[in-house]
Image (tube, rainbow, N blue to C red):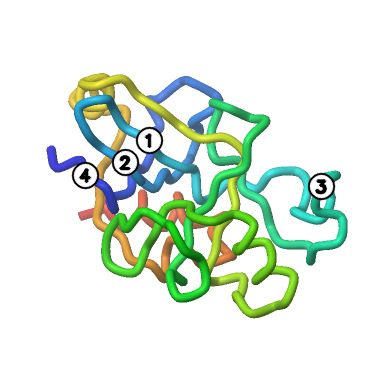
Amino acid sequence: MNISPGKILISSPSLTDPNFEKVVIYIAEYNKKGTLGYVINTLFPRAFNELILYTHSPPLILYDGGPMEKESLFFLHCRPDLIAGGIHIIDSIYLGGDFKQAVKNINEHTIPENDIKLFIGYCGWNYGQLEEEVAEGCWLVFNTTAEMVFNPSTQNIWKQLYDDNTNL
């Protein structure tokens, strides 16, 4: 079992929690405190510009990042040249950073939609909890690429990944 930042989790059909049915989760943090990730293939029912504070912004897609902290926005990006303060995860992927700077770049159209992904909520596991769930067969763990994470057409990614990796 090789869980680490930059990996993705694919939910198994045996996982019965409706929050995690056919989801693909990007692991952003993995340490002694636990694991933090974001669902990259489930759309939130509203766009970024439909949130009260961002009505002046473009209609960027929002993703339902997970069941925790549903009142908060989080983001991944691959533009440290435009957004300062992000935490480097792996390759060209960064977690968070200066959100005001991110919004400014979104509004000025200097950051393309395929360079940033906005989430409402996140997924979290206590230390050791995710390892137990993987051992029980609830999750499959895989490597990923920035192109896969930031692709705005990720609704069918679960089926593609699951089929590709269970029909071997």
> Rounded to the nearest whole Å, what is the CA distance between mark 1 and mark 2?
5 Å
User: Looking at the image, is mark 3 or mark 1 nearer the viewer?
Assistant: 3
Residue position marked by numbered label 2 in the rendering: 29
The x and y percentages for residue 16 are 46, 20
Numbered disc 1: secondary structure? strand
User: Looking at the image, is mark 3 or mark 2 nearer the viewer?
Assistant: 3
User: Looking at the image, is mark 3 or mark 4 nearer the viewer?
Assistant: 3
Q: Amino acid at mark 1?
A: Leu
Numbered disc 3: secondary structure? helix
Residue position marked by numbered label 1 in the rendering: 36
Kindly check if marks 3 and 4 are in contact, taking CB atoms under 8 A apart as contact. no
Q: Quadrant of the C terminus?
A: bottom left
* Residue at horizontal 29 percent and vertical 53 percent from the top: 6
Kindly check if marks 4 and 1 are in contact, taking CB atoms under 8 A apart as contact. no
Which numbered disc flags the more N-terminal residue, 3 or 1? Answer: 1
> Rounded to the nearest whole Å, what is the CA distance between mark 4 and mark 1?
10 Å
The x and y percentages for residue 102 are 60, 63
Kindly check if marks 3 and 1 are in contact, taking CB atoms under 8 A apart as contact. no
Which numbered disc flags the more N-terminal residue, 4 or 1? Answer: 4
Q: Nearer the viewer, residue 64 or 107?
A: 107
At label 4, counting other C-alpha atoms closer than 10 Å, the crowd grade (few under 14, some 14-19, many 20 or more) is some
Residue position marked by numbered label 3 in the rendering: 53
Q: Residue furthest bottom?
A: 110
At label 1, counting other C-alpha atoms closer than 10 Å, the crowd grade (few under 14, some 14-19, many 20 or more) is some
At label 2, counting other C-alpha atoms closer than 10 Å, the crowd grade (few under 14, some 14-19, many 20 or more) is some
> Rounded to the nearest whole Å, what is the CA distance between mark 2 and mark 4?
7 Å
Q: Nearer the viewer, residue 63 or 29?
A: 29
Residue position marked by numbered label 4 in the rendering: 4
